[in-house]
Image (cartoon, grey):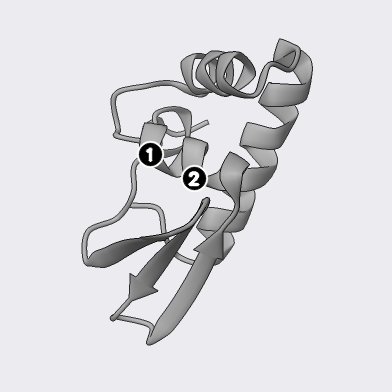
């Protein structure tokens, strides 16, 4: 696993706007808008290039009051989706 993936970060050039419980992410480079749900918002706000996936999973587990295995699965799935949408740096 590369450092980028083991300690993911949001890429530069994204604009964010809160909309209720969701977060809208405006990607000017790709002319796209992404709506993130509660779990994705927690992950998105936790990826700073310093935290590893395990610590992000613990934060999500605590915030959503779920077990660590569920949180870890959700974090991995969310990171895969963010990566597929070119939102990771």
Q: CA distance from mark 1 to mark 2?
A: 6 Å
Local crowd size for mark 2, using a 10 Å CA cut-off: few (<14), some (14–19), many (≥20): some
Which one is nearer the viewer's eye here, 67 or 88? 67
Horizontally, residue 20 falls left or right of residue 51, namely: right
Which one is nearer the viewer's eye here, 47 or 34? 34
Horizontally, residue 68 falls left or right of residue 42, namely: right
Which one is nearer the viewer's eye here, 85 or 23? 23
Residue 88: x, y in percent? 40, 53
The residue sitting at the left extreme is: 13
Q: Residue 30, labelled with which disc?
A: none
Q: Residue 45, labelled with which disc?
A: 1
Q: Residue at x 39, y 66 (%)?
A: 25
Question: Residues at badges 1 and 2 in contact (C-beta under 8 Å)?
Answer: yes
Dot 1 lies on which element?
Answer: helix
Q: Residue at x 39, y 32 (%)?
A: 46
Which quarter of the picture shows residue 74?
Answer: top right
Residue 76: x, y in percent? 65, 36
Dot 2 lies on which element?
Answer: helix
Which quarter of the picture shows residue 39?
Answer: top right
Q: What residue is pinned by disc 2?
A: 41
Q: Residue at x 75, y 12 (%)?
A: 67
Q: Residue at x 58, y 13 (%)?
A: 62
Residue 17: x, y in percent? 33, 63
């Amino acid at each position: 696993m590369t450092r980028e993936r083991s300690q993911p970060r949001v890429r530069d050039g994204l604009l964010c706007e809160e909309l209720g419980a969701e977060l809208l992410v405006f990607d000017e480079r790709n002319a796209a808008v992404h709506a993130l749900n509660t779990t994705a918002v927690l992950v998105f706000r936790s990826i700073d290039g310093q935290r590893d996936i395990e610590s992000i999973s613990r934060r999500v587990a605590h915030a959503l009051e779920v077990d660590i295995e569920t949180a870890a699965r959700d974090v991995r799935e969310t990171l895969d989706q963010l990566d597929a949408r070119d939102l990771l740096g």
